[in-house]
């Protein structure tokens, strides 16, 4: 199916998620694209094989490189992000690692904007062994400009961030980076390609973990990087192929299944999280509440410009945030389960607070697709333990 370029952004995204790039006549009319569960592809003659091997990254040769099921997913994700090319990986960290390993050389500096995903920081700490350094800063253009160094090669952004939901000025940072010859990349997992399109704001690369909203059912692990063809092709050659973090055809099929319902699921996540936020705002035990819909000042302006909707991840603080009180609150929950990750159908609650009362005193909720009144009743029961 070809895309209707005159459709609205939302209608175009819906077309991409459902039918775009699918060739049902090739699938014997099957409505679900087949899973090409194969490690290799064969050729009719040695001459054809030799010809294909000269450009292996453009042909189906071995599923560590290209696979038809994975390629369909990549085409859809590139179109959703308004990028030229996408490459899928076996995990979000596979995508992040391949990107870092490809783009960075000894002596390069990475500037992390907002609170980066923990394993991303751990990866950069490991890369210090190879002469790569990093530092961190806030999300305004001024903060980024003050933190840039002569050896900064990459600005890596998380916006909104996954603990405090902090935002960054994508347009301002992208413009500044271009003027300095610095590459930019963003972890766009919170917003999904439906609610934020960083490439249209000048960011060079956007990354996702497919395990969250895109998969949507908490049954797959995967990642993707999207951007200009020359950048992603280099990551494909030097990161994906050499590190070997190939997404399996079956996981790609699950991600394609998730895309079919992504627009509908995101609308429900948004409706549920806004109800939960309204409830939390009335609780006297809540001393801080973090979600982009509550942004003020310049962050509110960034949210208005960059986000077209709101995902279901939020965090909050409580009065006297000891580990005992936070644990008592979370352990009382019954509909919310305790677990890492987010973006699936289920609601989750975690905290990074430690038994010695160190660590962030935040409770993070991933609002799922359950009946919202069940979620509110569950939270009400937990809040009674704080009285």
Image (cartoon, rainbow, N blue to C red):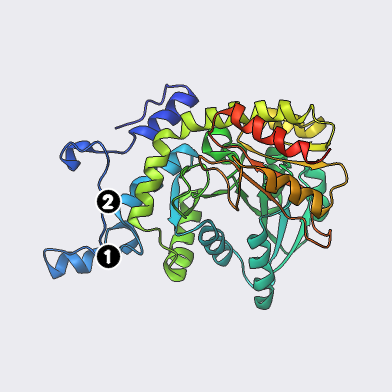
- In this rendering, the count of numbered labels is 2
- The reply, left or right, for residue 286 in relation to residue 107 is right
Percent coordinates x, y for residue 126 in the rendering: 65, 72
Q: Quadrant of the C terminus?
A: top right
- The image position of residue 224, as x and y in percent, is 48, 52
Q: Which residue is mark 2?
A: 35
Residue for badge 1: 39
Residue 189 place in picture, x, y as percent: 57, 45
Outermost residue toward the left? 44
Q: Position of residue 164 (x, y in %)?
A: 74, 44
Instruction: For the N terminus, give its image quadrant.
Output: top left
Q: Is residue 308 visible?
A: no
99 or 118, nearer to the observer? 118
Nearest the camera: 334 or 181?
334
Looking at the image, residue 128 sits to the left or right of residue 249; the answer is right
Q: Which mark is residue 132?
A: none
Q: Secondary structure at mark 2?
A: loop
Most foreground residue, 156 or 289: 289
Quadrant of res 103:
bottom right
Residue farthest to the right?
320
């Amino acid at each position: 199916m070809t895309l209707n370029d005159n459709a609205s952004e939302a209608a175009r995204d819906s077309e991409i998620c459902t039918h775009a790039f699918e060739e049902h006549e090739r699938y014997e009319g099957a409505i679900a694209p087949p899973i090409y569960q194969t490690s290799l592809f064969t050729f009719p003659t040695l001459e054809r094989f030799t010809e294909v091997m000269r450009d292996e990254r453009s042909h189906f040769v071995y599923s560590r490189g290209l696979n038809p099921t994975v390629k369909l997913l990549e085409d859809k994700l590139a179109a959703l992000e308004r990028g030229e090319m996408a490459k899928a990986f076996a995990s979000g960290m596979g995508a992040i690692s391949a990107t870092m390993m490809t783009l960075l050389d000894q002596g390069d500096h990475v500037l992390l904007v907002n609170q980066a995903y923990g394993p991303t920081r751990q990866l950069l700490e490991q890369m210090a062994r190879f002469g790569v350094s990093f530092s961190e800063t806030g999300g305004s253009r001024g903060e980024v400009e003050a933190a840039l160094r002569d050896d900064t090669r990459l600005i890596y952004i998380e916006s909104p961030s996954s603990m405090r939901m902090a935002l960054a000025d994508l347009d301002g940072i992208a413009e500044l980076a271009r003027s300095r010859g610095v590459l930019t990349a963003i972890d766009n997992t919170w917003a999904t390609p439906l609610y934020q399109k960083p490439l249209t704001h000048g960011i060079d690369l956007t990354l996702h973990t497919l395990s969250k909203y895109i998969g949507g059912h908490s049954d797959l692990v995967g990642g993707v990087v999207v951007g200009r063809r020359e950048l992603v092709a280099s990551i494909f050659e030097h990161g994906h192929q050499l590190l070997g973090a190939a997404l399996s055809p079956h996981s790609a099929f699950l991600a394609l299944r998730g895309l079919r319902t992504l627009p509908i699921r995101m609308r429900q996540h948004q409706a549920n999280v806004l109800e939960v936020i309204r409830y939390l705002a009335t609780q006297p035990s809540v001393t801080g509440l973090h979600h982009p819909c509550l942004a003020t000042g310049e962050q509110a302006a960034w949210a208005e410009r960059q986000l077209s909707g709101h995902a279901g991840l939020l965090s909050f603080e409580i009065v006297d945030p000891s580990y005992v009180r936070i644990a008592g609150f979370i352990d009382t929950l019954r509909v919310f389960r305790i677990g890492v990750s987010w973006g699936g159908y289920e609601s989750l609650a975690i905290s990074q607070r430690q038994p010695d009362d160190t660590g962030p005193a935040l409770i993070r909720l991933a609002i799922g697709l359950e009946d919202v009144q069940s979620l509110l009743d569950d939270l009400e029961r937990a809040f009674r333990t704080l009285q």
